């Protein structure tokens, strides 16, 4: 059939898929080799959604077909679909570690090419908790560790938000990562870890010498403010153990951590804060002393 005179080897079906696309998509290695034997085959011909044969095999995890396609010099390694998702993006998203290794081993692959929402292969691997893929990507020199999505959320931000300790350890050992990079609402990885009460992740972040334990969100709310508001006693204790912590920093409404803890009925957190010599017992909200703050906390319980 391939050798028949006048045969259009690149003819598409109603979805825009060519014979090569279908063979590659289904992992038919021998058929792919036969089709690639034609000089007029279009190796990078996309379907109606911009998905090339390489896009499909990366998405499906067909390592053998990936190797065959990469043997061609005219392969477009970074051609994205209509949503900006490249073959490497899909391999990382699906957790196909073997395909990720093969693609990264070929010169010319862009490991940081984001989709239309700014999400890189590393971003998605971190978001989905795919430690194996993250490890492979981090082994590639020059990869952007702190590239944010359209909401300003980095791979580290999502690892902290999801409480993925293993991923945090892999990312935080890198000197070229930005541990204080906030999202569009000003929330840093430390803030989101504190809000969820994840002691392990909080300790990991505070272990970085360049961490800013007082960096507030856009409302002026520091990590300690969030911990006190939510009554996370162990997290409050961990934060208070940091030498650079400011226990009196108010938010934009002038509410301090100790006042927030009292207002929400977290009596133990109020006691912990009031035991600190650095804590101002006079709330800027109510000018309340320690007795009044404790009474507020008891009434709210």
Image (tube, rainbow, N blue to C red):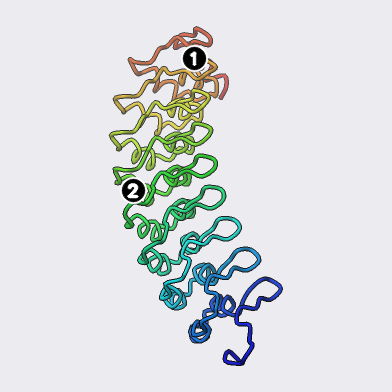
Residue 133, placed above or below residue 35: above
Image quadrant in which you'd find residue 278: top left
- Residue 185 left/right relative to 112: right
- List the residue tagged with mark 1: 293
Q: Badge 2 local density, few (<14 within 10 Å), some, or many (20+)?
A: some
Q: Nearer the viewer, residue 77 or 67?
A: 77
Q: Quick one: label 2 or label 1, which is nearer the N terminus?
A: 2
* Residue beneath the point at 48% across and 16% down: 294
Left or right, residue 297 beside residue 156? right
Label annotation for residue 49: none
At horizontal 68% and vertical 71% (from top left) the residue drawn is 15
Judging from the image, what secondary structure is the residue with disc 2 in?
helix
Q: Nearer the viewer, mark 2 or mark 1?
A: 2
Q: Position of residue 211 (x, y in %)?
A: 34, 33
Q: Which of 106 and 125 lies nearest the eye of the viewer? A: 106
Q: Residue at x 55, y 24 (%)?
A: 264
Question: Looking at the image, do the residues carrying marks 2 and 1 touch, with CB atoms under 8 Å apart?
Answer: no
> What's the residue at 41%, 20% (across, down)?
271
Quadrant of image for the C terminus: top right
Q: CA distance from mark 2 to mark 1?
A: 39 Å
The residue to which callout 2 is attached is 169
Q: Is residue 47 above or below residue 24?
A: above
- What percent of the width, then of the height, locates residue 138? 35, 54
Image vertical order of residue 3 relative to residue 284, above or below: below
Q: x, y (%) of residue 4?
A: 61, 92
Q: Nearer the viewer, residue 276 or 106?
A: 106
């Amino acid at each position: 059939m391939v050798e028949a005179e006048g045969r259009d080897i690149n003819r598409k079906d109603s979805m825009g898929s060519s014979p090569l696309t279908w063979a590659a998509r289904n992992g038919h290695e021998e058929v792919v080799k036969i089709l690639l034997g034609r000089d007029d085959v279009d190796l990078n011909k996309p379907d109606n959604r911009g998905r090339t044969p390489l896009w499909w095999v990366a998405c499906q995890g067909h390592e053998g077909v990936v190797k065959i396609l990469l043997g061609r010099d005219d392969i477009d390694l970074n051609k994205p679909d209509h949503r900006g998702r490249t073959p490497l993006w899909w391999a990382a998203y699906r957790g196909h570690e073997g395909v990720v290794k093969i693609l990264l081993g070929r010169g010319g692959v862009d490991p940081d090419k984001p989709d239309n929402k700014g999400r890189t292969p590393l971003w998605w691997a971190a978001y989905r908790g795919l430690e194996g893929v993250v490890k492979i990507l981090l082994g590639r020199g020059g990869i952007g560790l702190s590239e944010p999505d359209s909401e300003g959320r980095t791979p580290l931000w999502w690892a902290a938000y999801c409480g993925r300790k293993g991923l945090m350890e892999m990312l935080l050992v890198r000197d070229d990562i930005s541990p204080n990079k906030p999202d569009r609402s000003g929330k840093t990885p430390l803030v989101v870890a504190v809000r969820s009460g994840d002691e392990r992740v909080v300790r990991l972040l505070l272990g970085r010498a360049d961490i800013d334990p007082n960096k507030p969100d856009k409302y002026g709310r520091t990590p300690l403010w969030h911990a006190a508001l939510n009554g996370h006693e162990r997290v409050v204790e961990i934060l208070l153990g940091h030498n650079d912590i400011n226990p009196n920093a108010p938010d934009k409404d002038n509410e301090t951590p100790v006042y927030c803890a009292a207002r929400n009925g977290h009596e133990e957190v109020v006691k912990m804060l009031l035991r600190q010599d650095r804590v101002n017992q006079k709330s800027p909200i109510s000018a309340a002393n320690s007795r009044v703050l404790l009474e507020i906390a008891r009434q709210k319980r």
